Structure formats: C-alpha cells, structure tokens
Amino acid sequence: MDQLLSMTTMSSFDIIMLGSSGVGKSSITTRSLDANASFPPVTVGVEYTVKTITLPQSYIKLCICDCSGQDRFMHLLRSYYLNCQGAIIVYDIQNRESFEKAKDWVIELREQVSPDMVIAFTGNKADLEANRTVSEKEADEYAKDFNLIYI
C-alpha cells in the first residue's frame, strides 16, 4: 500500500470560467460534476468547485472558479484570474455580443496573465442551433488564430 501511495502523484490546477452573464458558465461547471444536474441559479460574485480526475498512478485536482458575468463584478475578477493556470471562456452561440466579449477576455488574459495561458474557447447552447448567430467556422478560425482550444 505504501508503495502504491508513493507512485501516486497529485497535480492541482486553478481554472477560471469567464464570459458574459447568461452564457451558461455555471451550467457547464455543474454538468461537469453531475451529468444529471438541473440548471443552477445565476451566479452572484464567484463560486468555487473542485473536481478530482483519477488517472493511473495520479490524480488531477481542478479548482474551478466560476465568475459572474455581471458588469458590477468585473473589477473583482483580476484578483481571481492572475493565479490561474488556465481559463474556459464561454459565449452563447446565439448571442454575437457574448462572442465579442469572449474575444475581449482572451486579450485580457493574454496581456495580464500570460501570452501562453491555456484557454478553452467554448461555444455554448448548441441545442439552440436554429438560432445561431456565430458560425462554428468563424469561432474555429478565431480559436486557431489565437492558439485556443475550441469546444
């Protein structure tokens, strides 16, 4: 048993969820923990979630910081994202304004944290494809241009 524990490693990463209000950041976070979870209430301020991923001989602990997209909380976010190793920036595929704001977040993080920060650029609400205003091609090209993981 002691030998097994010595072969097991634990890595911890802080991830921040950013995007406009109502794009589904909290829903993505909640559903990543429980696929059957119902829609969470609107986030006010910041909420933390911890998810542990078990791999052979190691564990990855993700500390997910889900930030409100409300403008009144924007001034607080810098203190949260400065210590993060990665970000998930979410936009609503049916809301062009949220897409443009998501692009602003990419620039902010690359300038304020690191030009090499790992960022997942995420189009949400794919179930509402009929109302899409941001094409998948446009988002994919943007992600490639800025070396983002596109989901």
Image (cartoon, grey):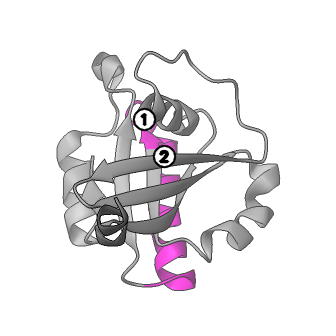
Q: Nearer the viewer, mark 1 or mark 2?
A: 2
Q: Is residue 131 left or right of residue 28?
A: left
Question: Pointer 1: residues within 10 angstroms few (<14), some, or many (20+)?
Answer: few
Q: Is residue 38 visible?
A: yes
Task: Say what amino acid the circle numbered 1 marks.
Answer: Ser
Rendered residue at 45%/28% (across/down)? 31
Residue 105 within the segment the image draws in magenta: yes
Toward the viewer: 50 or 15? 50
Q: Which residue is mark 1?
A: 32
Task: Say what secondary structure mark 2 lies in.
Answer: strand
Distance between the alpha carbons at the discs numbered 1 and 2? 8 Å
Which residues make up the magenta segment? 91-114
- Out of 129 and 97, give the one closest to the viewer: 129
Q: Residue 2 location in percent, x, y?
A: 37, 65
Query: Could you say whether the residue bearing mark 1 is in a helix, strand or loop?
Result: helix
Q: Position of residue 121 (x, y in %)?
A: 36, 54
> The N terminus lies in which quarter of the figure?
bottom left
Mark 2 residue type: Lys
Q: Residue at x 64, y 39 (%)?
A: 21
The label on residue 51 is: 2
Asked which quadrant contains residue 38, the reply is top right
Q: In percent of the image, x 36 and y 46: which residue is there?
A: 122
Asked if marks 1 and 2 touch (Cβ < 8 Å), the reply is: yes
Q: Residue placed farthest to the right in the image?
A: 72
Q: Nearer the viewer, residue 6 or 65?
A: 6
